[in-house]
Amino acid sequence: MILEEKLLKDYSLSVERMLQIKSDFYCVEAYDFKNYILTNIDIDNEAKSFCIDNLIVPIALECNVLTIVMDNPFRLDLIETLRLLTSCDIKCRVGLGRDVEKYIANISQIFRNSIKENARLCVSIHYC
């Protein structure tokens, strides 16, 4: 990620060009967060925590295919673990490290609130 920032800053690469370079290198589709709408993806709490801890941004869940954005899609161990946690097929896209970190900070609050709400519901159901 340090190299990525250096290239963007020192060599005046545009975000679009840097995403294209990463897309070509990793052989996956790039994802530009400029049009990202923050939503709560319906995955279980363990998977949500895993995504936050490992800087994985889930962006869509359709027909049992979870689409995620990562800084480094070569982290196959993380992708496989997420696949096992969610029982979904995983479609990976690549994003800029700084964007992934920024959106993890944003979604972590939504996910953590969702986890707390689920825990509250479990406790209230247990005591009823």
Image: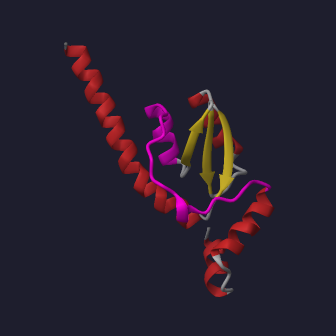
Give the tally of numbered discs.
0
Residue reaching furthest to the left: 128
Establish if 33 lies above or below 66: below
- Which picture quadrant has residue 95? bottom right
Which quadrant of the figure contains the N terminus? bottom right
The colour scheme used to paint the residues is secondary structure
Residue under the image location 49 percent in, 33 percent down: 43
Q: Position of residue 123 (x, y in %)?
A: 25, 22
The percent position of residue 3, horizontal first and vertical second, equals 66, 73
Q: Is residue 41 magenta?
A: yes
Q: Quadrant of residue 66?
A: top right
Q: Residue at x 36, y 36 (%)?
A: 115
Question: Magenta region: which residues?
Answer: 27-53
Q: Residue at x 51, y 40 (%)?
A: 50
- Tell me if 80 is positioned left or right of 120 in this view: right
Q: 33 and 77: which one is in front?
A: 33
Q: Is residue 119 above or below residue 60?
A: above
| Apparent side of residue 52 relative to residue 31 in the rendered image (left or right) | left
The answer to if 117 sits in the magenta stretch is no
**From what the image shows, is residue 71 above or below residue 81?**
below
Image position of 82 with respect to 73: above or below: above
Q: Residue at position x 67%, y 52% from top?
A: 93
Quadrant for the C terminus in the image: top left
Horizontal and vertical percent for residue 14? 65, 79
Q: Viewer-proximal residue, 4 or 128?
A: 128
Q: Position of residue 105 (x, y in %)?
A: 42, 57
